[in-house]
Amino acid sequence: MTALELEALFGSLSRLPDVDADNLQAYDATDRILLETAADMMGADTEVVIIGDRYGALTLGALAGLGVGHVRVHQDLFTGRLALERNAAAAGLEGRFTQHELGPELLGEAELVLVQLPKSLAGLEEISDAVARFAAPEAVVLAGGRVKHMSTGMNAVLEKSFSSVQPQLARQKSRVLIARDPRKVPDAPPYPVVEPLQELGITVCARGAVFSGARLDIGTRFLLTFLDRIPAAGHVMDLGCGTGILATMYARRHEGSKVVATDQSAAAVASARGTVAANGVGERVTVIHDDAMSTLEPGSADLILLNPPFHVGTSVHAGAALKMFQAAARVLAPGGELWTVYNSHLQYRSALERLIGPSSEEGRNPKFTVTRSIKS
Ligand SMILES: C[S@@+](CC[C@H](N)C(=O)[O-])C[C@H]1O[C@@H](n2cnc3c(N)ncnc32)[C@H](O)[C@@H]1O
């Protein structure tokens, strides 16, 4: 595949069903540079694994340009998985990749692992440990990102699992780190972390890439101070559940409720499953990997708890929270309630009034506002 053909493939990619906007792209220079670096390392039948592909640029670029027949893929985001499938179908490359969770199925015998660097060091630590643990001993990792989002902490994390970590020269504002020679891994993998959260009297389970790790987010802490006032309801959603703290706390308080915790992140889903099980509410809390409750019936929830995301990937974009409000409007039954917490400067109240219905401010501290919206 020529450079021009690769650019044409990139240009055809769509971010949908993720938030789409003119200032948000479906690929970046990191994808291009990772593929170019990989092309120089390919032998006959090299086993290629792709981790962290956003919308398919790496997977489809590898299939079309590196001469591989099939690749194994791990994407954390549900939206990324759907986007890859859609883009693969559009490019006629469907059926040539399989999706796996981080583990031996994904990485067994892998020789070349292409990674779009995750946002958090903990996310990278889990990936790096998994590659060292399960891939072939001669495996090479190419981990790339935008220079402005990279830190030397990333090299240090890779060095925990690999003896050789070589940063390459930055090009087009992206840089690739090449890691080789996996070290002997400790018997127990570093993730999930399972820790008591004493202030709430629960145990939290956290995979590397999950929001806030095993700690309590300060917005969530504020929302939980309203737990006594949040009504008992039959069908309850913890939307964007992260480690599942809201679902767990609600289920412990209301034994008659059925709770669904859902998140677009596979790391969040695995974490929340661990958290609800560790706190004895696994029978009453179902955890679903989904994008903004897309697989749930309209009008099927009486109550939704939400601490919405502020960032889309590494850019700040209100679209992610508005998408959650729209989803809540669809899934709430008439008279159902959305309780949400957000940074007060975001002033979401008018959007909540417009999308859901009458919305009251239930409380405010120096940083956050909690609102209750009733579906009209
Ligand atoms: C601010 S965090 C809150 C996490 C958790 N509820 C807590 O209180 O710690 C927002 C969460 O929403 C998830 N999220 C963002 N967009 C989403 C979407 N479209 N569908 C489902 N979950 C989403 C993120 O993965 C993240 O876990």
Image (cartoon, rainbow, N blue to C red):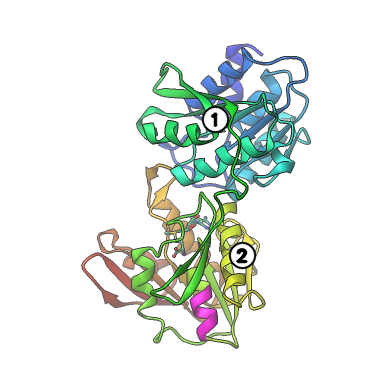
Element on which disc 1 rests: strand
Instruction: Give the percent coordinates (x, y) of residue 330.
Output: 55, 68
Q: Mark 1 points at which residue?
A: 162
As rendered, which of 144 and 159 lies closer to the eye?
159
Tell me, yes or no, if residue 244 can be seen here: yes
Q: How far apart are marks 1 and 2 (CA)?
A: 30 Å
Going 59% across and 62% down the picture, which residue do you hit?
293
* Quadrant in which the N terminus is drawn: top right
Label for residue 273? Answer: 2
Vertical relation: 216 (above or below) 224: above
Q: Nearer the viewer's eye, disc 1 or disc 2? A: 1
Task: Say which amino acid is labelled 1.
Answer: Phe
As rendered, which of 354 and 40 lies closer to the eye?
40
Vertical relation: 96 (above or below) 273: above
Q: Which class describes the residues within 10 Å of circle 2: few (<14), some (14-19), or many (20+)?
A: many
Going 63% across and 15% down the picture, which residue do you hit?
39
